[in-house]
Image: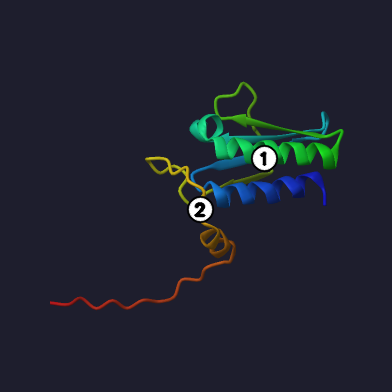
């Protein structure tokens, strides 16, 4: 698996766990740095569960793809993702108040399969 595919898979995983987040990914092939921009700032700065998982992804990435590296940045960073090759956002991204809870595994599993909405016919009762 390439470094880009690995990160895209991990970002989808992060989105399933933290549905209030958004992630943009860009690969600077010249420097060998993969940049992931994270929204909102509160998720990046304040959520300890998120920080732990992000750290584990960074360590795994370094072990698998050295000398390439990954850099997670917030939306107020001096560095910015300007040409994203991949973006993904959670179900609750942009909603207030921010939902920072890890979803139960059953919801995460359910969220991985495509949902096809059926036709509903709701009659009004008088």
**Residue to which mark 2 is pinned:** 103
Mark 1–mark 2 contact, CB under 8 Å? no
Vertical comparison of 123 with 81: above or below = below
Which circle, 1 or 2, is nearer the viewer? 2
Cα distance, mark 1 to mark 2? 23 Å
Q: Position of residue 105 (x, y in %)?
A: 55, 59
Which secondary structure, mark 1?
Answer: strand
Vertical comparison of 77 with 88: above or below = above
Q: Position of residue 89 (x, y in %)?
A: 55, 47
Q: Residue at x 62, y 45 (%)?
A: 87
Q: Position of residue 98 (x, y in %)?
A: 42, 40
Q: Give the quadrant of residue 56.
A: top right
Which residue is more in the foreground, 107 or 111? 107
- Pick out the residue farthest to the left: 126
Q: Is residue 35 left or right of residue 102?
A: right
Q: Earlier in the sequence, mark 1 or mark 2?
A: 1
**Which numbered dot is residue 25?**
1
Q: Residue at x 56, y 40 (%)?
A: 49
Which residue is more in the foreground, 126 or 109? 109
Q: Residue at x 80, y 44 (%)?
A: 3
If the image is split into quadrants, where does the C terminus sit? bottom left
Which secondary structure, mark 2?
Answer: loop
Whether residue 9 appears in this view of the structure is: yes
Which residue is more in the foreground, 54 or 94? 54
Q: Position of residue 40 (x, y in %)?
A: 50, 35
Q: Give the quadrant of residue 52.
A: top right
Local packing at callout 2 (Cα closer than 10 Å; few below 14, some 14-19, many 20+) is: some
């Amino acid at each position: 698996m390439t470094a880009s595919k690995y990160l895209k898979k991990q970002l989808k995983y992060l989105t399933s766990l933290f549905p209030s987040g958004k992630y943009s990914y860009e690969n600077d092939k010249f420097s060998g740095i993969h940049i992931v921009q994270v929204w909102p700032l509160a998720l990046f700065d304040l959520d300890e569960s998120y920080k732990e998982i992000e750290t584990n992804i960074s360590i795994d990435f370094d072990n698998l793809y050295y000398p390439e590296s990954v850099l997670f940045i917030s939306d107020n960073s001096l560095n910015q993702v300007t040409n994203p090759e991949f973006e993904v956002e959670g179900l609750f991204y942009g909603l207030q108040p921010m939902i920072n809870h890890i979803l139960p595994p059953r919801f995460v599993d359910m969220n991985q399969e495509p949902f096809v909405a059926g036709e509903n016919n709701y009659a009004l009762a008088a």
